[in-house]
């Protein structure tokens, strides 16, 4: 069985189409799937829509978390998926920037190769297709972020932040108890922990459609930089600096919406 986690923060305008498309596609493919919608600190009607689909389809379940943050939502989603019989566990964004047929390509690649433990989609590979292309500024942010990840954290991926990834159950079982850093750094921290535990995670090209309503905060570049530096410190002898930062008054810290 395949578990697909969909973190959802104020997605009432987009998640209905995503859930219907994914459920229809995997039924046609006759793939046993469990779609887990993890709602994180939403203020709109996303829970109502998730309840509607959960009542209608046995393949869909959801939880509504009081805490926010994509990282926290995914960690809780992993815990739920591990309570199922899923052999593969992945996640995808709620806006359907990754279509179900393109997500399924990741799954098939994972299941057809015993030597890999996870497959992540990469938007910036030469053979990837990006529809409704990002603005020059947004693409520049992404490129800088990925360069920092390569230089400071030694992760040889061109796109750690793409919201389409799938892993074998054993990999998720091993790293879920170790996860704790959320927000921008979650995907990176997860990939580092997978690497450090000997799992082989590969990236592949994808088809990506940048959806309307996906916003990048003006403070995003600063937050991205701090996230990478924080992780670099975390995996260094200077980890105590993070402890000092956590002790600072909240007004001195940089925050953003999940």
Image (tube, helix red, strand yellow):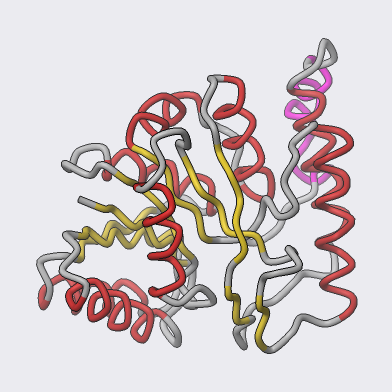
**Relative side of 165 to 245, left or right:** left
Q: Considering depth in this image, is 103 or 140 the residue closer to the camera?
A: 103
Count of numbered labels shown in the rendering: 0
- Residue at image position (32%, 45%) is 88
Indicate yes or no whether the magenta region holds residue 246: yes
Q: Which residues are magenta?
A: 240-253
Residue 172 horizontal/vertical position (percent) = 40, 34
| Rendered location of residue 118, percent (x, y) | 48, 42
Q: Main secondary structure of the magenta part?
A: helix
Task: Answer above or below: position of 61 versus 27.
Answer: above
Residue 185 appears at what percent x and percent y?
68, 43
Residue for point 77% across, 42% down: 227
In the displayed structure, would residue 233 be above or below residue 145?
A: above
Q: Outermost residue toward the top?
A: 237
Please give left or right for residue 72 compared with residue 170 in the image. right
Viewer-proximal residue, 86 or 48?
Answer: 86
Identify which residue is drawn at 20% across, 38% down. Answer: 83
In this orientation, which residue lies closer to the viewer: 175 or 166?
166
What x and y, as percent, mark residue 174? 41, 24
Residue at 56% across, 61% down: 163
Query: From the image, which quarter does the C terminus lie in?
Result: bottom right
Residue 169 appears in which quarter of the rendering?
Answer: top left
Please tell me whether residue 36 belongs to the stretch shown in magenta: no
């Amino acid at each position: 069985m395949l578990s697909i986690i969909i973190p959802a923060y104020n997605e009432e305008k987009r998640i209905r189409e995503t859930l219907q498309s994914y459920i229809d596609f995997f039924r046609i493919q006759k793939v046993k799937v469990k779609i887990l919608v993890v709602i994180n600190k939403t203020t709109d009607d996303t829970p109502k829509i998730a309840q509607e689909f959960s009542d209608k389809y046995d393949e869909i379940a959801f939880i509504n978390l009081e805490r926010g943050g994509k990282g926290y939502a995914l960690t809780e989603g992993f815990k739920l998926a591990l309570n199922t019989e899923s052999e593969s566990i992945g996640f995808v964004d709620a806006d359907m920037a990754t279509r179900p047929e393109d997500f399924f390509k990741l799954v098939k690649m994972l299941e057809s190769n015993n030597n890999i433990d996870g497959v992540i989609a990469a938007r910036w590979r030469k053979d990837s297709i990006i529809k409704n292309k990002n603005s020059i500024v947004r693409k520049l942010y992404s490129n800088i972020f990925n360069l920092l990840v390569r230089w400071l954290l030694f992760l040889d991926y061109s796109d750690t932040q793409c919201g389409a990834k799938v892993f074998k159950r054993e990999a998720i079982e091993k790293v879920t108890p170790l996860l704790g850093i959320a927000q921008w750094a979650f995907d990176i921290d997860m990939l580092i922990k997978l690497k450090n535990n000997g799992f082989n995670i590969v990236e592949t090209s994808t088809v990506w459609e940048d959806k309307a309503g996906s916003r990048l905060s003006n403070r995003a570049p600063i937050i991205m930089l701090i996230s990478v530096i924080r992780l670099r410190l975390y995996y260094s002898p200077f980890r105590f600096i993070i402890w000092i930062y956590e002790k600072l008054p909240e007004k001195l810290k940089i925050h953003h919406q999940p």
